[in-house]
Amino acid sequence: MKEPQIIVIGNGMVGYKFCEKLRSKTSSFNLIVFGEEPRRAYDRVHLSEYFNGKTADDLSLSTENWYQEQNITLFLNNPVTKIDRDLQKVYTANGLDYSYDILVFATGSGAFVPNIPGIEKEGVFVYRTIEDLDLISSYAKKAKTASVIGGGLLGLEAAKALIDLGIEKTSIIEFAPRLMPRQIDAAGSDMLKSKLADLGLQIHLNKNTTSIEGDGRITALKFSDDTALDVDMLVISAGIKPRDELAKACGIEVGPRGGIVVDEKMQTNDPAVFAIGECALYDGMIYGLIAPGYEMAEVLAANLCEGEKTFTGFDMSTKLKLIGIDVASFGDNFIAEPDCRTIIFENKHKGVYKRINVSNDGQYLLGGILIGDATAYNLLLQTSNNKIVLPEDPAELILGARGGSESAGGAGITGLPDSALICSCEGVSKGDICSTVADGSCENIDDLKKCTKAGTGCGGCLPMVKDLMTYTLKSQGKYIKNVICEHFNYSRQELFDLIHIHELKSYDEVLDVLGKNDGCEVCKPLVSSLLASLWNEMILKKGNDVAQDSNDRFLANIQKGGSYSVVPRVPGGEITPDKLIVIGEVAKKYNLYTKITGGQRIDMFGAHLNDLPIIWEELIAAGFESGHAYGKGLRTVKSCVGSTWCRFGLHDSVSFAIRIEERYRGIRAPHKFKSAVSGCIRECAEAQSKDFGIIATEKGWNLYVCGNGGSKPQHALLLATDLDSETCIKYIDRFLMFYIRTADPLTRTATWLNKMEGGIDYLRNVIINDSLGMATQWENEIENLIASYKCEWKEAVENPAIRKRFSHFVNAPEDKDPTIEFVEMRGQKRTAEWKTV
């Protein structure tokens, strides 16, 4: 008996997902797919990453031979142009014709292009396919200003792409009075607008574009309010329109504003024809997100295999990171009083806006909006969707629990029902995840993703998926081992101890004795960091360039444009006039951009790779050494002028800061760490925002630990009071070695303490009371590290084998990288932006 033949029109994300889901259920259908584009289905959700170095193959959803392995016939670059429903045949642009028993429209959507006079001019693009991105990338090389029409999700993504391409003067034109009008309210839009403006984007709201000016090529935009904007390039990202023209031509019912009308089983008005994804109109709505499209694919695949599944609409909650800014909305995000109680938190200094809408009886979360900080999104979404009763003070959901109470959100993920949808992209519930872990099928996140597909779509659910996995394993009494990667079956702390016991001195030795296979980009820099933390040997003498990350490899931070920075150490911020003159002379000689940093150093930017050794030589001759701005170790010890000059100063903070910095310089750790010494409680050195900070008192020094600035600032906590200088240093020695030995990779001291059972009280007991009996060992270990310190710059310039790597060209080592370009800025130079081709 001949197998029924299914033809799928469209090879986008939803068309591919339908094929994947159908084949996971049965192999009985003969499956043929016609794609319009010249390439296999790829990830449009992360399309902008194409500008950040990802290739078309990286974005592809399948391997090259996947369709063949699944017994699917795939035609690329060959769209269906005609359908004969009476004969049940399709005809293609390349002259093929095929019969079908079942026809599936997965034609998706196209970019909506408004009918603006001049829209056909050169320099006007849409933002939809990889081919579109190639055209945009090529044209951007000759553009200095650009605009995007559309302030929605796609418009902001397009604006980010233009910035990535080096067009600094980029603007967004939005017809509505606010950005992302379907997701966020006016106050959220204002916050987002402010954050985007900080990044250099110009935002024009309430703008109706009436014409595109220019003689064959775009030069300006004109608006209905009689204003104009000069631009060299325009990207249209004003929404989508369903690709329903083929269906309409063959008599399939479409909606008055477009879209192929379907029922709850994805069936059209023809029993043999179905539609899924952005071309389908269900209950008067086009769903423009990927998760509903995937759910439609699942519904259709299940019903074709004699299942009983229906599509009843879809939650349009979404969380995105747009140009590095968290933006999320969930549930009924626009409901307002008196139909609910609205709780709003706004911090304009940090660019954070949070709004939640609570039922009038205070029992349930109805919806909300998050800008700038969406860490609570997953739990808030689940709380809303599953009608979980709220804590007594619902404000705790966005402010956190206070006064020592239980964490806001009650039981959290453990309180969710098994039916709670955790991964909306793949339709994976809490019960699916927990049962897969509980039956022993998967005990790590990679296996869990393969088994359930959870987290393989947009990836936004992964934190909750990991928490559920950990919760299930713990509930079974299983030991959860935080291994480094597949090549080392040890945690960082275990590997640290084993390297020490076996006295291993190189990455290759560690891999041979403790690991397997060839290693990876995760374990190589981590092992190099451990070796440096243990033995404090020159990091470039390990005999394996790829064992270091790029900054350690060249003892400098690589900057935008491909140049490098030079940051000499200035202990305590104290510098002599002669040394200042040398920095000025070096910067002038090598045409470097100079900046005084918040850490009381002078950074020099724009150095060519092959100039680094000769720049270092001149600085070393003047008494400078590496500031380790590139390494995971001590960066700076900031100080105020203390009792030396200040009338409020209690002690000599500068001298103590210099002593501290020279003691711990070059010591490698799981992450960078910073310090500061303030001469009095006025705290001019900001010691309480450092990994360890010291503040003078009438009787000595107060020692604070585990603070940090950055994107998630945290105040340091008081470890000990009124210490003399020697005791203070002894406690810092112990603190640093405890941190180096036990913290996970790339974990700052603040996060390390936050995860530590017992918190600051336990840490105080370990450091001051020596509750682990390790104090003497740690003090001896750090003395060995201090005694073995050498300036890495000096080591590099004096070692011919190491110095050789600072040349771009083997045959002409003096030649500089010709791809690095510079532009003028306020009397100095900087590197031009990278442009992706």
Image (cartoon, rainbow, N blue to C red):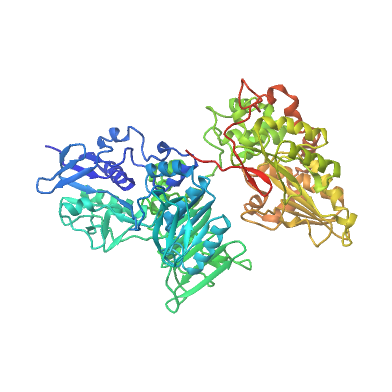
Instruction: Please tell me whether residue 533 is drawn above or below residue 144 in the rendered image.
Output: above
Residue at (40%, 56%) from the top-left corner? Answer: 212
Q: Which corner quadrant of the image does residue 57 belong to?
A: top left
Quick check: can you spot residue 444?
A: no
Could you say where residue 695 lies in the image, as x and y percent from the top left?
Answer: 81, 57
Residue nearer the viewer, 5 or 120:
120
Could you say where residue 9 lies in the image, as x and y percent from the top left?
Answer: 24, 45
- State which quarter of the image contains the N terminus: top left
Residue nearer the viewer, 720 or 143:
143
Could you say where residue 553 lies in the image, as x and y percent from the top left?
Answer: 64, 32
Instruction: Please tell me whether residue 533 is drawn above or below residue 217 in the rendered image.
Output: above
Residue occupying the far left of the picture = 86
Residue occupying the far bottom of the picture = 338
Residue occupying the far front of the picture = 215
Could you say where residue 709 lies in the image, as x and y percent from the top left?
Answer: 67, 54
Q: Which corner quadrant of the image does residue 269 belong to?
A: bottom left
Quick check: can you spot residue 518?
A: yes
